[in-house]
Amino acid sequence: MKTLFCDLDNTLLFPLENGSYGIKEKDLLALKKVIHQQLQLVIASGRPAEIKDAISAMIGDDVDAIGFNGQQIMTSSENIVFASFPVKDYLKITDWMKEHYPQTNAGTTDFDGVYYVNDLSMHQPMQRFKDHYRAGIIRDICELPSKEAFKNHGITEVAKLLIYIDPQTDSKPIISNLMQHFGQEYDFIRSNKMFIEGLCKGHSKKTGIEAYIKMHNLDLNDCYCAGDADNDIDMFELFKNHSFCMKAGSENAKNAAAVLVDDLAEAIEKICKWQRVISAIYIFNPRFFLD
């Protein structure tokens, strides 16, 4: 059995023609053909690990998830949180952002998948959130400003920091400035054209995947990954020749991955083809694996 660690946005999940948000038909058919027979799917995403339930419903079979870029692992029997973002730090950093980059807005999500936004009147991808909510990808959208919601509900920890920026914004100077001021405790990365994400230091998709592999005693040689964005680069580096990047992905991600593909269905086809080749080699020359 092979394991595919798969990113969500623009790798597995896309806006669909009917206005909903989900898995493209071609990718869904490819997954259903191999899921839990030749291939185990594990979500590796910046989203809440709870999204496993929505993806499982779409595919018709249970999947595991690594959420918040390695800060959480959720299976049918486990829910492990490795790190969280103290609200006091979230507010400190977002207040600093408001002072130095007033054109940006900030938001966050808790470990239950509820989204919060600092300033509801400013730029935010609200339509995207609403589409995700209708698709069951997120649990809820808070209609109060973050500070007020945190105080009302006694929330002291959140999962990560989201900074909403204009897609055309050069994020490198912003990230550099954030790292200069807060980089001892937190990492910052542009994970999407609309977002800069802040995460607890030392946690990433790679660390979450490594923890999952250890927990489930997987062979790294039987594992693959697929993604499209800068926050997928460290898992591409972990899997080296077993890494797939969407051709529509970021330039940095495409440069880091071993194989470029049009879609997830193509990646699955290549994984299955490689497995058939390896099986044929073993049948005709088993000593090849002993030499």
Image (cartoon, rainbow, N blue to C red):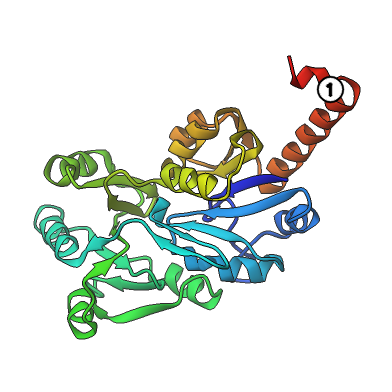
What residue appears at the point 73 percent right and 45 percent down from the top-left corner?
Answer: 1
Task: Report which quarter residue 98 is drawn in.
Answer: bottom left
In the image, is 64 to the left or to the right of 159? right
Furthest residue toward top? 291
In the image, is 89 to the left or to the right of 113? left
What residue appears at the point 69 percent right and 65 percent down from the top-left corner?
Answer: 59
Q: Could you classify mark 1 by the number of other residues whose Cα lies within 10 Å: few (under 14), some (14-19), or many (20 or more)?
A: few
Furthest residue toward bottom? 152
Q: Is residue 240 above or below residue 87?
A: above
Task: Report which quarter residue 118 is drawn in.
Answer: bottom left
Instruction: Look at label 1 and name its amino acid.
Output: Pro
SS for callout 1? helix
Percent x, y for residue 92?
12, 60
What residue is disc 1 on?
Answer: 286
Furthest residue toward right? 284
Say how many tags the image has: 1
Q: Is residue 195 above or below residue 154?
A: above
Of residues 257 and 205, the one nearer the viewer is 205
Of residues 106 and 46, the one nearer the viewer is 46
Percent x, y for residue 243?
58, 35
Q: Is residue 213 above or below residue 260?
A: below
Position of the C terminus, as image quadrant, is top right
What residue appears at the point 81 percent right and 18 percent down from the top-left corner?
Answer: 287
The reply to whether residue 123 is in sight is no
Percent x, y for residue 198?
28, 52
The reply to whether residue 108 is in sight is yes
Q: Is residue 153 above or below residue 234?
A: below
Percent x, y for residue 175?
23, 43
